[in-house]
Image: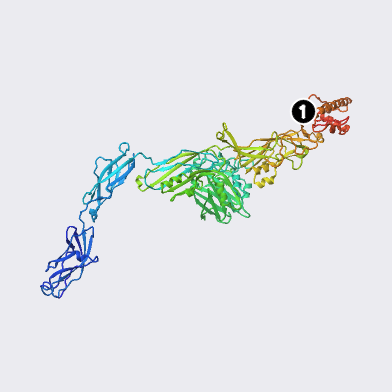
Amino acid sequence: NKHKPWIETEYQGIVMENDNTVLLNPPLFALDKDAPLHYAGEICGFRVHNGPSGSGSVQFEAVVLDRSTGEGLVRSKEPLDCESQREHSFTIQAYDCGEGPDGVNSKKSHKATVHVRVNDVNEFSPVFVERRYEASVPEGRLFDRIVRVEALDADCSPQYSQICFYDIITPNVPFAIDNDGNIKNTEPLDSKRQRVHTFWVTAFDCGKNRAQADAQVVVTVKPSCKPGWIGWTKRVEYTPGSGSIPLFPSLHLETCEETVWNIQATVELQTGHIGKGCDRDSYSDRSVRRLCGAVRGEVDLLPPPSPAANWTSALPTLPSSDSSLVFSFNGSSHVAVVPDLVVSALSGDHFTLQLWMRRGATNIQPSTPQSRGNRKEEETIVCSTVKNDDSYSHYSLSVHGCRLSLFYWPDVSAARPVKFLWKLEQVCDSEWHHLSLSVQFPSVTLYVDGVTFDPALIHDNGAIPNPAARQRMLIGACWEPEEKQKEILNNTIPEGKDSVKYVGGYHGLLSGVTVRPGSVEPHSVVECLYACREGLDFGDLETLGSGMKVHVNPSQSVLVLEGDDIESFNRAVQQVTYRNSLRFATPGVRPLKLTTSLRCFNEESCLSLKQLEGYLVVLQPDAPQISLSGVGPHLARPAPEFEGPRGVPLFPELRIVCSLSHAVNTAAQGMEGGALMSDAVAHTLDGCEVQPLGEELNPEREELLVDMDVVRERGLEIINTTAYIAITGAESISVYEDVLRSVRYRLAKGSARFERRFRLSCSEMNGRYTSNELTLEVNFLHSLDSLYQPSHLLASQQQFLHPSHHSGELSGHTLPNPHRNSVVPGAATVIIMVCVGFLVVMVILGVFRIRSIHRRGEGARGGPKEGSSQWDDSALTIIVNPMESYESRMGISADTEGEGEEEEEEVAESPDDASDDQRIIIKKEGRDGNARRY
């Protein structure tokens, strides 16, 4: 017995649950090289040892089927259960019969590993997880899944443990079930026809074993539920001055029990038809800049057409609901050439360019085929070459597609150009946008609608011709390079034709184009200039539930809500508000849109909600009542005061009050009918005008004076002509009161007349609301000495509007400082004096007539003058100065004979002057008293 038995090193075995014989691969054979020796070459047995699990030797045994061939068999000692243990491992070892029948000196083989897998037998049937399934669905819809039933099989193998299919065993029900247990309806359910559907389902495993017990399914049909927004109000009214109001106070989303994991709602307020995209301050661009605290010194490149600014007169304009003037450019012929006098004030490489732009929105005649063909070219908004200290710099702002570019040449004779490029959707969306370009070369900052955008810096090293060293600026196009112009002159253009050709024409609308040289505007000022006074807002961010997000765009026209919980989302929607901070909001309709997007766990059956449309109506605001008082209707002063160097203030005690009249509910107060209540409010005026009624002012004889220091200090603008004085600019009422009180009326020496009338009015919101017209009649009081000056026969009237500054309330002819020689109508006691004076005058007149006839009879005077000295007293109106006492009139010494003759000539001319309604006062000075006229 020299050799050990030999077996394989590893065996794989399979045994069925209902069998104990293990089928090995490869089969179990033990070989011994001592064969065919008796005993030594025979295999007497196999021994089973514990495997990794430690139980193999207990459950399995190995027996020898043929000692000579060494064939063996592995079998289990007891039935195996696949569900409790599916795999077994153990080792086996063979040994020979040794040297005799007693097995002396037998030898063992090496140990071989045996892996046995227990194959499953379909011994179990499916069992439903629940015996009863319930679900409720709304009527009238088809669902991909109403409820899912589930059955389990206890077999260990996938073949018998898996449920291959389910089946509805109740006949004639409008439901179907798939292999995964999902039950759906095959037709829309009607709660009126059948409220509850009950049916049975069974399950089969892949071995075709049916479930031990069937499951019951109960489906309840609910009355129709329409998914969508409930409580939507199509019309929302807003009363100006209400602050913020909720747009959707009772709105909530109904998903009809559809499980969603993400909700997104977009609220859009369309205000593009109002001004430049929303309700902003109804003041001029210059006034808004000052209200926002912008540094002064900007230059308006597109001013309103006027004799002083005529380069915009050829540009078409469009109506605008705000105060700005909108200019239209058609991309070809509409170009504004800024005068050199204006361009010369814009030197330097530090400046801020601001403008409102709406590209491609001109309501002008259609473009020519040539302009449409060149639409791919860059469209130039501003093109400028300015002179610095000892060089010229050039820049151009252009748009191309959805790109905005700034081409900057620090020195046209030396430095290379630099191009700054921005890719912006705002450039090509045909909406109004505010652009502010701050240049502090080499730094450039762009604000679009108050938001900063960083540029991509490009050094353009291409063959770009140097711009000509010549100062000029264009709005809406740029000039052709000098080289091309020379070629045109040499080849095609006839003599005498203008060789300047514009290229890169802008197609769109522009407004408020200004340049301010010097330091750039701070970000806060830029935001203020763009800021909308109306928009969407969210009431209280602290009330947001977990997982909720809110986003509002810079113009506050779009608000986006996003969340995952229906209840939190509904509360958030009810917090969306509309606000308008303008006291006098622009009335009209603002369309509203609500777009909702839902994401469900089952994307196929997820709800799809249609877009809701409504509108917000801003009601007409209560009109403010601007009241001017404290002046007139008469202002009487001695004529010498008007001839002083400072003149006389016209409105020294002017009062400006602005109030709002609104209806109040008087029924609750026990009053009949309605009433109006007026509340005084603080307002901002934007213009006042002082206008002489009748003829315009004669600059050689009279003028209106304004304290220019006060005007400049307040940043107001003034236009002073012979027809009116206009003070403009958004400022408080108190400032306008101070300025208007400083308005004075001055006359040249000897130019005093008897009266002059002025009219004052003010306005706010760019003339949208105007005050009452305050008319003041100025009376000039003459002393007796001034009666010899015939210049008092002047009569002219003029027109103009505005408020002023000073003290002293004038009511009627009340004089705060009466002069000794003033003529003032008296009261009841004066009537007596008038009667007495009238008798005295009649006596004096008789004496005077006798002397006059006597002198004419002596022929003291001849020629045409004699004829003119004979006058008819039938139309004579005699008015006695009621303020002088009879004693004072009788106490004045008589004048000389020569003076009487001169006075006689003046009195003789009085019939020609009767139409002037001049007052004539005649006094008697002793026996030879001469008549004097006032």
Q: Name above or below for residue 305 compared with residue 924.
A: below
* Amino acid type, label 1: Ala
Residue farthest to the front? 670
Q: Secondary structure at mark 1?
A: helix
Residue 331 or 590: which is nearer the viewer? 590
Q: Quadrant of the C terminus?
A: top right
- Residue wearing tag 1: 914
Residue farthest to the right? 858
- Where residue 122 sits in the image (x, y, percent)? 20, 54
Q: Name above or below for residue 910 compared with residue 684.
A: above
Q: Name above or below for residue 120 compared with residue 692.
A: below
Is 648 left or right of 351, judged from the image as shown? right
Residue 480 or 723: which is nearer the viewer? 723
Is 371 left or right of 604, judged from the image as shown? right
- Where residue 139 sits in the image (x, y, percent)? 34, 39
- Where residue 427 sits in the image (x, y, percent)? 50, 47
Residue 756 or 157: which is nearer the viewer? 157
Query: Would residue 63 be visible to someone looking at this image?
Result: yes
Q: Quadrant of the N terminus?
A: bottom left
Q: Residue at x 32, y 38 (%)?
A: 191
Q: How many marks?
A: 1
